[in-house]
Image: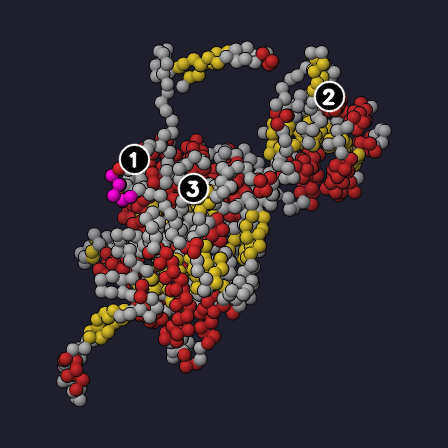
Amino acid sequence: MATINLQGDFYQRYKAANPSFDPYTYLCAEETVEELIKKETTSEHPGMLLGKVQSGKTRTFISIIALAFDNGFDIAIVLSKNSRALLEQTAKRLNSEFRMFVDDAELDIYDIMHTPESFGIYELDSKLIFVAKKQSDNLRRLIDLFKSNAIMSNKRTLIIDDEADNASIGYTKKTGLIEANKIASQVSNLRSVIINSSYLQVTATPYSLYLQPTEVEVANVITFKPTRPAFTKLVPVPHEYVGGETYFGDSANSEEDTLESLIHHTVAHWLYDTKTGEPRENPGRRDAGYWYKTDKVGGAQTKLFVEEERDDIELVNALRKDVNRWRESKYRGASNVTKDLLNYWASKDRARRLFFCQREAVETIIYLAEIRIPGRTSKTMFQEFAVRDEDIQQLLKGERPGFYQTATDYFPTLVDPSPDGSILPLQRLGCKMATGSGKTVVMAMLVSWAFCNRGVNPNSTEFPNAVLVVCPNLTVKERLQVLRPEDAKNYYTEFDIVPLKYRPLMQKGKVLVTNWHLFNPQSEHEEGGKTYAVVNKGPDTPETFARHILGDDLYRRMPIMVLNDEGHHCWRPLPNDNGEEQAGGNGEDIEDEVKEATVWVEGLDKLNNSNPHGPKARGISLCVDLSATPFYISGSGHPEGRPFPWLVSDFGLVDAIESGIVKIPRMPVMDVTGLPDPKYFKLWETIRSRLQPVDFLPGKARRPKPAVVYREAEGALQQLAGQWKERFEYVESATPGQEHVPPVMIVVCDNTDIAELVYQKISGETQVELVTQADIEDEDEEEAPAKGKRKAKAKWITSYGHSEVLPHFENTESRKHTIRIDTKLLAEAESGDPKKGKKDFAEELRQVVATVGKPGQPGEHVRCVVSVGMLTEGWDANNVTHILGIRAFGSQLLCEQVVGRGLRRMDYTPTKTDDGKELLTEEYVDVYGIPFSVIPFKGRVVTASATEDKPKQHVMALPERKAMEIQFPVVEGYPPLTIGASSERGTSTFAVIRRCWRESWGISSRTVTYRL
């Protein structure tokens, strides 16, 4: 590429005067000028600036003029259509854009019909711009001006032919000779008169220009200048651009209309008023951002909609621009394997289409890991980036990047350094992906990328052939076994992630799935899960730790890739000025969270510093976090709700709801105003506002009595249960072929006492003390028990009665329709730690919770779940249809976490609309008592029926005909066709005879030989 001056006075002042221009406008200008100053792109070889209608072509070519003036060009000529109004508009625009230079006498701009007859040396010291119509008198005057001034005709001149397909070309055939029309011949003569010129065509309709011959003999022009472009640069389309596709659509198969996108990232998004909840449409894609509380808005729970502050995630927004451009370039600079995979995942011919958010997350990780972080930026052939190479280096050093100018102590980074400065810092990349948007598929795509590349280049360690997947609990660990290539239900086959030609390579890599509990330090006296006094192994070293976690095989394969599923549990507590971890949160709960986060991240530190190839070699080549809520929590020492600084991709819950990837929350609204009904929307605040002093338990916490809370919440509970019953009856009356999975209602309570009472009221199940005859006799004794005799321990039995809410929720001895989740007991079972001595009923609870809604599983018959917490990760039940919150919600983050438990869709089968679009059918979850203000929702009058909840019809084979199933192979191609013998071993050739009747073009018939 030619070297150009980007620091010249014209260009720098012009950019400073137009800071709002898209960076890619300037990048396009720079790439165009690089081409123009080459010897090959003189007047003999025109260039093309191609852009959509009203997409910013004028802005771009004016930027080109400014840069050209700093790179040897002295004169610019702008040719416009034969329209006085358009000419005046162009001249006015140029004078406005270059006003500072005109005022400083550095530039003069002329309408050619009002130009002096001659120019002296003084006038020619300034830069000049001439504006002319493509009209005979204008062009003749322009030609005469340059012919009469030798100095001017020798100055480097840039001719910009706006709307170049209009009038600049055109021929007639007379008596066997080709003649150019008058305007085309004059434009060619102008290009000939100027000794040192470059010719740039600007248009949105380039077809006629591309079809021109490279050379043509024109009878009425001595030397006819060619008009076929020698190079083409595309004008970047701004985010706010609304073109023909928006109004008319491309076709029924356009990307925006099909499952390839499922997010209107190039059309529009909704903005939600935090005071009224009213949405308004906004053009372009929603910027990545997050909501947080300040002292100013911390008490906003008293208002209908919570007021929180919003801030952008600037690294994500900057990377989106670079990744979008990289995608448009067909992933220039990536390996052939990577290109194959990315194109395969984007194919519209896939039987199982991938969501755009899945592709974008993977593209961003690959772009950074394969192109930018290793320093291969030049392979993209781009010159300017939203995130520059200097920014990447600063991000990797934990320094404030140049693009982030906000004056706070928080800034993006791609490293998570340990307080121990002597060890290698952990590089982390984070992807925010809403619940139900397909994080496991994204992990499978990343594993495929690594293993396929490594399989093709087995001697390279650039792409890891070992992956460690770390997850929060045993249930998730069991489900993520689908990431192991050898698993019978692996996602690489199930979701068609890997093309057939690469599938054998997947078996050469190894995937290990574990939960973070395995990172807990081992006792020096432990061996085989048991402790012995005679065993003393000494403290763990990074090597022994790595071998214990990975095993010898994966240890030898270092460096590895680590995927942190639900990575929001992995963070470093921020110490205060005294070096102590800051407190906050809810007592034991935050202590448990801090312990989990610390064990997890310190375990990764040990792995990262245990590479057998040397102390300076990182053991983890790539660490990727995937989470729906990658934010710091209260008590972490960081501001609550602040995102992890290594986030590089963002697809949040609002995007997922608007895209239809998850269910739509449906809230109770008043039938008159349509606004959320406060008594149901802000249930906890409504309850507390009605309480009297006598309604609180003793103590500083001022916790309301459970019976009082239930009394005040009963109306909302009964209302929501009635809606659940309606949907349950829809399911019960479903015909064969329709969904028969029963709906589930979740009730999230403020504390265990309230949860216990709510559970009893819903299920009818209570604990009753067992009283025997001996107990009665003891009560008759007036004296205290004899010395040494202990009073017998009370015995309790389970009693099954009637539900005070719905008989459908009643428990019996043989079947539990309502379950209560004991958070601590469940956490014990989820740890999978044999040292915990987990109880059988704890494991039974885990199995029930993990299989809610799954036919033939322990949780098949569950219809209602009562819990204190928001339910543990691993809860992926897609039949949750109703959620009731009877607790305080201190932030939008907590609202999102609780609502997210019910947003996973039941059906991902697209349906075609009347206009040919493929869309997912709307699914809903009714939500009471969760006061979110930044999540889109649909209103439902509390007394209204919801017929849209009726089960959907599916076409499927009957279970009894399973044995008759026919599977068809995926065919990617056919073996070569052999006709006749071949002179080359292993090669088949055949001749294809094509008779080309092209007499009018003077091309004879020919024989073409194709080698297969």
- Relative to 147, residue 254 above or below: below
Examine the structure image and report whether residue 924 is included in the region drawn in magenta.
no
The x and y percentages for residue 396 are: 48, 46
> How is the protein colored in the picture?
secondary structure
At a point 75% along the width and 39% down the height, the residue shown is 89
The boundaries of the magenta stretch are 958-963
The x and y percentages for residue 281 are: 57, 52
Which numbered disc covers residue 181?
A: 2
**Mark 1 residue type:** Ile
Look at mark 3 in the image and give the residue it sits on: 354
Mark 2 falls on what kind of element?
Answer: loop
At a point 58% along the width and 42% down the height, the residue shown is 246
At a point 49% along the width and 46% down the height, the residue shown is 263
Q: Earlier in the sequence, mark 2 or mark 1?
A: 2
Res. 793 image quadrant:
bottom left
Look at mark 1 in the image and give the residue it sits on: 966
Nearest the viewer among 875 and 255 is: 255
